[in-house]
């Protein structure tokens, strides 16, 4: 499923952005999938950053328990 692919990507790479989800996994609605993963019991933290152009974007990562 998309959720499994996102979870595996985060385990392998440490985090995921919407851009990575679209390009690497073909997933268009990362925030919705992240919410589903959280409801399934995964601890995911979203950190907001700014690009060099000033655009704000989120980086989702699994939180160690």
Image (cartoon, rainbow, N blue to C red):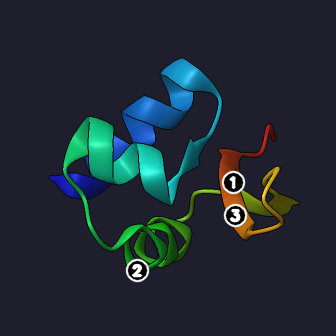
**Secondary structure category for the residue under label 3:** strand
Q: Which residue is mark 1?
A: 59
Tell me the quarter of the picture where residue 24 sits. top left
Which circle marks residue 32 in the picture?
2
Task: State yes or no: discs 2 and 1 in contact (Cβ < 8 Å).
Answer: no
13 to 35, vertically: above or below: above
Taking the image as shown, residue 16 lies to the left or right of residue 2, namely: right
Binning the other alpha carbons within 10 Å of mark 3 as few (below 14), some (14 to 19) or many (20 upward) gives some
Q: Nearer the viewer, residue 13 or 26?
A: 26
The number of discs equals 3
Location of residue 46 by image quarter: bottom right
Work out which residue is located at the far top of the displayed protein and give it.
Answer: 12
Residue beneath the point at 50% across and 77% down: 35
In this picture, is 24 found above or below 55?
above
Residue drawn 56% across and 23% down? 13
Q: Is residue 1 above or below residue 25?
A: below
Is 51 on the left-hand or right-hand side of 5?
A: right
Whole-angstrom CA distance, mark 2 to mark 1, is 14 Å
* Tag 1 secondary structure: strand
Q: CA distance from mark 2 to mark 3?
A: 13 Å
| Mark 2 in CB contact with mark 3 (< 8 angstroms) | no
* Of marks 2 and 3, the one in the foreground: 3
Q: Quadrant of the C terminus?
A: top right
Q: Which residue is mark 3?
A: 58
Crowding at label 2, few (<14), some or many (≥20) Cα neighbours within 10 Å?
few
């Amino acid at each position: 499923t998309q959720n499994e692919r996102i979870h595996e990507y985060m385990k392998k790479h440490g985090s995921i952005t919407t851009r990575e989800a679209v390009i690497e996994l073909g997933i268009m609605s990362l925030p919705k999938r992240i919410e589903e993963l959280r409801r399934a019991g995964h601890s995911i933290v979203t950190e907001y950053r700014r690009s060099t152009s000033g655009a704000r974007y989120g980086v989702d990562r699994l939180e160690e328990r």
